[in-house]
Amino acid sequence: MTIMGAIAQARTSVRLATPYFLPDAPLINALRVAALRGVNVEIVLPEHGNLRLVEWAMVAQLPQVLAWGCRVHLTRPPFDHTKLMVVDGAWSLIGSCNLDPRSLRLNFEYNVECYSTELAATLGRILDDKIAAGRVLTLDELERLPLWRRLRNGAVWLAQPYL
């Protein structure tokens, strides 16, 4: 609820980094609605994951955010395990939680919510560095994936509650 509330209140930006981006439908919709409101939504993910099935499931649902104006940036190796979120350069969430239902609801995770423009600026610079060293993922790039890969990724996405 904290993450959803922060996204709903965002006026200018929602920036997040996570190694495992497997959000449920309400979180995907919150990000899409924010982008439609004109909020700059940036999602920073590792270009290559350390869990193959999770990576395939992540790729399967990325068109749902890209098509609505969110931007996805991929970080180059080594594997990036950063988990943080910055909203409007003033609010931050950092901790061990991944953006998937299991991590958010079932696992024993610890996150810290901070209201500090100074901390948000520092975390923003970390995200800026990751983005500058990585590359942008486009919807066109995902649509050009071979059909067998899109089908495989979609089939693995169906197992998302167990990943």
Image (cartoon, rainbow, N blue to C red):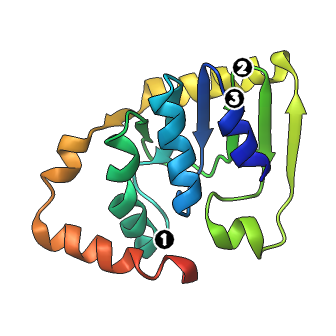
Q: Residue 28: horizontal and vertical position, in percent?
A: 51, 52
Which quadrant is the C terminus positioned in?
bottom right
Please state which amino acid type lies under the numbered disc 2: Gly
Marks 2 & 3, CB-CB < 8 Å contact: yes
Q: Would you place residue 33 above or below residue 60 in this image?
A: above
Q: Is residue 20 visible?
A: no
Total tally of numbered discs in the picture: 3
Q: Residue 134: horizontal and vertical position, in percent?
A: 41, 33
Q: Residue 147: horizontal and vertical position, in percent?
A: 11, 68
Query: Circle 1 — which element?
Result: loop
Q: Which residue is mark 3?
A: 87
Which circle's residue, 1 or 2, is located before the other in the chain? 1
Query: Circle 3 — which element?
Result: strand
Q: Would you place residue 156 above or below residue 41 in this image?
A: below
Please state which amino acid type lies under the numbered disc 3: Val
Q: Residue at x 35, y 42 (%)?
A: 66
Q: Which residue is mark 1?
A: 51
In the image, 135: left or right of 54?
left
Q: Which residue is mark 2?
A: 89
Is 26 in front, or is 80? Answer: 26
How many other residues sit within 10 Å of disc 2, few (<14), some (14-19) or many (≥20)?
many
Task: Report which quarter residue 135 is drawn in.
Answer: top left
How many other residues sit within 10 Å of disc 3, few (<14), some (14-19) or many (≥20)?
many
Q: Residue 145: horizontal and vertical position, in percent?
A: 15, 57
Q: Is residue 155 visible?
A: yes
Disc 3/disc 1 C-alpha distance (Å): 28 Å
Q: Would you place residue 32 above or below residue 133 in this image?
A: below
